[in-house]
Amino acid sequence: MATTFPQRIFSGIQPSGGLTLGNYLGALKRFVEKQDEGIETIYCLVDLHAITVWQDPERLRQQTREAAAAFIAAGIDPDRSILFNQSQVTGHAELAWIFNCVARIGWMYRMTQFKDKTAGKNAENSSLGLLAYPSLMAADILLYKATHVPVGEDQKQHLELARDIAAKFNHDYGRTFFPITEPVIEGAGTRVMSLTDGTKKMSKSDPSDNSRINLTDDADAIAKKIRRAKTDSEPLPESAEGLKDRPDARNLINIYAGLSGLSVDQVVTEFAGAQFGTFKPKLADLAVAKLSPITTEMNRLMKDPAEIDRILGKGADRADAIARPVIDETKDIVGMIRSR
């Protein structure tokens, strides 16, 4: 008889650097929508992942609080969803070590993100944590026996690895203990690209601030960045097919679709034949209308860091209540003695 697992959603964001429009459309907006689907939702600020590269301690604390404020300002209700920072729940690190002993080194070297992050560098000078990052990600998910994970395309390979680790653990110990988690990849804004280069992902680590819209940007900054966004000289096409070889145009259309809730086809139909001089002001107005309230609420929340810490602590207690029985049973399965 097949084992069934209660539906549970888990996902996380790394609190290293300010969050961007890409984080909002690719993650936060979708997290809020999932909160309303009647499935238990657990959202985590993955500060253990952040330290795979060196972080200034005070800045890490600041960025973790800022990311928590962004979650709440975007619509995550800490009473309806569990919101916490990863390092407060020790089961993440405990299960990650067990998974380090299940996963194979070759699996880690095949991860494209590790290759990307070490490209042109001496990979042997990277932290061991950077290489083992996907094993910790698997632990993050499976510690809660999450059945579904909203992820962007760039994290899909890591989720596939989590599925491999779960399957190998289940096989090695002869039981169906961990679920084979399903990715949830949907929506026009799941992969937002740079405003200065439509072939590259919008990134908080890009040296150019004009390449991204930060969730801390005010209305003037948002509008200015969209006006300056890279485009081509052609009018918008009559159909979505016409965006195929126009990455900058496609990116702006995708952003409009993600912010408006319309499909790409609907946006193209609405603006077919328009020049970017007409389209960009409409996009700027939409972005300001959607993002400015989030920025305002984030600023309000950040004035009371103790309240943010209280919310994260309460979330960590709720997360630990789910995680502790899972890690304890995992240790029993592996053969570890627990005297308490």
Image: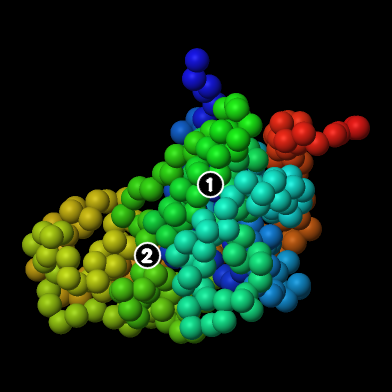
Q: Nearer the viewer, mark 1 or mark 2?
A: 1
Q: Nearer the viewer, residue 310 or 180?
A: 180
The answer to whether any part of residue 25 appears in the image is: no
Residue 223 is left or right of residue 217, and the answer is left
Q: Residue at x 66, y 71 (%)?
A: 127
The crowding category of the residue bearing disc 2, from other C-alpha atoms within 10 Å (few below 14, some 14 to 19, many at least 20), is many
Q: Nearest the camera: 297 or 151?
A: 151
The reply to whether dot 1 and dot 2 touch (C-beta < 8 Å) is no
Secondary structure at badge 1 equals helix
Q: Residue furthest right?
A: 339
* Residue 298 percent coordinates (x, y): 60, 62
Disc 2 element: loop
Callout 2 amino acid: Val
Q: Between disc 1 and disc 2, whose residue precedes?
A: 1
For the residues labelled 1 and 2, the Cα–Cα distance comes to 24 Å
| Residue at 30% in and 74% down | 198
For residue 301, side relative to residue 255 (left or right): right
Q: Determine which quarter of the picture holds residue 123.
A: bottom right
Up-down relation of residue 308 to residue 8 (above or below): below
- Circle 1 Cα neighbour tier, 10 Å, few/some/many (<14 / 14–19 / ≥20): many
x and y, in percent, of residue 205 in the image = 52, 76
For the point 52% across and 23% down, the residue is 4
Residue picked out by circle 2: 192
Decide: is 192 above or below 309.
below
- Residue 177: horizontal and vertical position, in percent? 61, 30
In the shown orientation, is residue 97 left or right of residue 220? right
Is 332 located above or below residue 186 in the figure?
above
Q: Which residue in the protein does label 1 denote? A: 162
Q: Front-most of 308 and 46?
A: 46
**Picture coordinates of residue 270 (x, y %)?**
16, 58
